[in-house]
Amino acid sequence: MIEKREPKRRADAERSRTLILEAAVRLLSERPGAGMSTIAKEAGVTRQTVYAHFASRDELLTATVDHITGQAKAAFDAAHLDDGPATDALLRLLDIGWRFFRKSPILHHVGAFAGPSDRSRAVPLNTRLLTLIRRGQQAGEFEPAASPQWLVTAIIALGNAAGDEVRTDRMTVPEAQQVLRHSVLRLVSSQPASDAERR
């Protein structure tokens, strides 16, 4: 009997943990200061249940970031960034970043929006971007003279800037998304700028 109860308990615990993390994602996007009790209410569990999974709010925040990062990694896998022209793959990568920015703008750690304090979590995604840049350079799509690592750093900086414009209400997400796509393509392009663009 005990053996039968254990799998059910583990499944119930995993479900409640997922409910808490999804609630944290929703709340922290709109209310960054939301506390454990508020998150518990949003998740439909007791405060004690939240503390059974996460010893502190900081631990819950870290788990929430990891939860979103895991979802982002899965989205990057599904985007098949190694297939097709590198330029198209780069645009798919940027679009995924915006998808997760829309989902949780307070957790601006995903993809091209990785901040300095989130560098350790951003490494796998930045590695994918680096691989993509190198592929584009080898194919002649991207500027061959620029350091791939520098291009990655510059793209991340542009992503952070675009995210900041949205967070401070100076741009809408569609506006910032369009500007970022244009700026990144100009940055990596192997084609020289036209006279009109130079002016």
Image: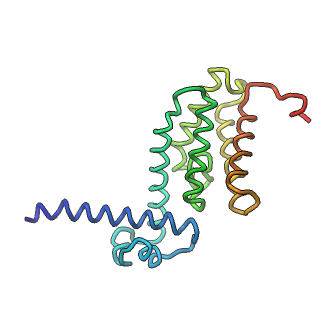
Q: How is the image coloured?
A: rainbow
Q: Quadrant of the C terminus?
A: top right
The foreground one among 56 and 110 is 110
Q: Quadrant of the N terminus?
A: bottom left
Q: Dividing the picture into quarters, in which one does residue 12 lie? A: bottom left
**Residue at x-position 40% and y-position 67%:** 20
Q: Is residue 106 left or right of residue 180?
A: left
Q: Classify 16 as above or below 122.
A: below
**Residue at x-position 68% and y-position 36%:** 151
**Residue at x-position 56% and y-position 65%:** 29
* Position in image of residue 75 (x %, y %): 48, 44
Q: Classify 176 as above or below 133.
A: below
Q: Classify 199 as above or below 70.
A: above
Counting labels gives: 0
* Position in image of residue 129 (x %, y %): 58, 37
* Position in image of residue 9 (x %, y %): 22, 65
**Residue at x-position 58% and y-position 40%:** 93
Residue lying furthest top: 139
* Position in image of residue 67 (x %, y %): 44, 56
Q: Classify 118 as above or below 156.
A: below
Residue lying furthest left: 1
Q: Dividing the picture into quarters, in which one does residue 187 lie? A: top right
The foreground one among 103 and 159 is 103
